[in-house]
Amino acid sequence: MKYDYLVVGAGLYGAVFAHEAMQKGKKVLVVDKRPHIAGNIYTEDVDGIRVHRYGAHIFHTSDRRVWEYVNRFAEFNNYINSPIARYHDELYNLPFNMNTFSKMWGIATPDEAKKIIRDQIADLNITEPKNLEEQALSLVGRDVYEKLIKGYTEKQWGRPCTELPAFIIRRLPLRFVYDNNYFNDRYQGIPIGGYTQIVEKLLAGADVRLACDFLKNREALSSMADRILYTGQIDQYYDYRLGVLEYRSVRFETEELDTDNFQGNAVVNYTAREVPYTRIIEHKHFEFGKQDHTIISREYSSEWKKGDEPYYPVNNARNNALYEEYRKLAEGETRVRFGGRLGAYKYYDMDKVIAAALAFCDDELK
Ligand code: UDP
């Protein structure tokens, strides 16, 4: 055995583990089927602009240990995420807050906003929201639901809001103050110079093989290390023998434009059902870029099928139960462990990935 650990997947979870294992004197080999490191937080420098290749990544956390950890590998700027929602030609602030309500209804005070919401849902008698539609209506009323939630959510998830779980919308803050900060977390920012450097530094000292598909070289690679951390799709590892876990996938159309400022904000959500994409990201604004050109990505949501990039786990009852079966199978492994978004079939924010990876290190490297 040449290595103590084989880490399958050079994303954030695998890289944190590889780093911590090396700190303990372990020899680590990291493989990834993509031609680059950093998984979905990969940022690529294109004409001086860091392009978030796999969608907008904004680091936010309330976990001081995680914040201090990640700051060891990059300096963060003071970017605060304040997306704009565009419904036809109407523009609103997100998350739903007094700026949104005052623009929607021409009102000024929290009491006025709350009264309008109450009046809009009075006849619905929602006590315990059964699905995303009921949850959204009971939180923000009919106007905000129809203009800013319904179309966007149905595009993103490809299902009617009445068939989606309520918890999805609970990710999105709602407040009755004039505050456009999308996140409630204490710490927030974008690493100056992009995310890839963080993973590069985490992996320093490890052997890394890119464009190397573990599942196509399973035996040879497995024989090179004592233990394996697998951060790919858990069902694929088992050849889908119990069934296929579902995901939503995303496709990006990226374009360089000969203007210095296309939309005036990093993130603009297109909430109307008729617009085929869900949002447009203008990458330079994450780092307050001053270039005379710009790069934008239109984001299209699609149903995942084998071979596509898996993005969002569809955590409904059927899939969660199936994942549980795979997890039991994984528990029986003696030298392979699973983790990360795909290994745990969980929609993790980056800070949660780091926290989960550090907890895994405590257990695995004790
Ligand atoms: N959402 C919405 N309108 C918006 C933005 C978000 O209805 O303009 C809802 C939608 O259901 C979405 C959820 O909030 O699935 C979470 O969105 P967020 O943008 O936070 O998720 P991300 O895709 O960025 O992880």
Image (tube, rainbow, N blue to C red):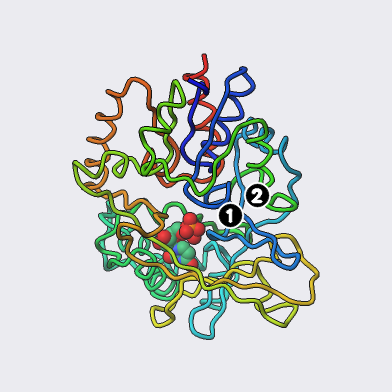
Q: Is residue 24 left or right of residue 144?
A: right
**Residue 236, quarter of picture:** top left
Q: Position of residue 251 (x, y in %)?
A: 45, 67
Answer whether residue 114 is visible to the viewer in this image.
no
Q: Nearer the viewer, mark 2 or mark 1?
A: 2
Identify which residue, 127 or 280, lies in the foreground: 280
Does the beta carbon of the residue at mark 1 sit less than 8 Å from ligand 1? no
Of the image marks 2 and 1, the number of the one nearer the N terminus: 1
Identify which residue, 89 or 124, lies in the foreground: 89
Does the beta carbon of the residue at mark 2 sit less than 8 Å from ligand 1? no
Give the class, few, some or many, for how many residues have Cα within 10 Å of label 2's Cα (few <14, many ≥20).
Answer: many
> Separation of disc 2 and disc 1 at Cα?
9 Å
Relative to 299, residue 55 above or below: above
Relative to 225, residue 116 above or below: below
Q: Which residue is mark 1?
A: 57
Q: Position of residue 196 (x, y in %)?
A: 65, 49
Q: Is residue 129 left or right of residue 82?
A: left
Q: Which mark is residue 195?
A: 2
Q: Secondary structure at mark 2?
A: loop
**Residue 166, quarter of picture:** bottom left
Q: Position of residue 42 (x, y in %)?
A: 59, 53
Q: Is residue 192 left or right of residue 119?
A: right
Mark 1: amino acid: His
Q: Residue shown at 40%/33% (left/top)?
A: 220
Furthest residue toward bottom? 89
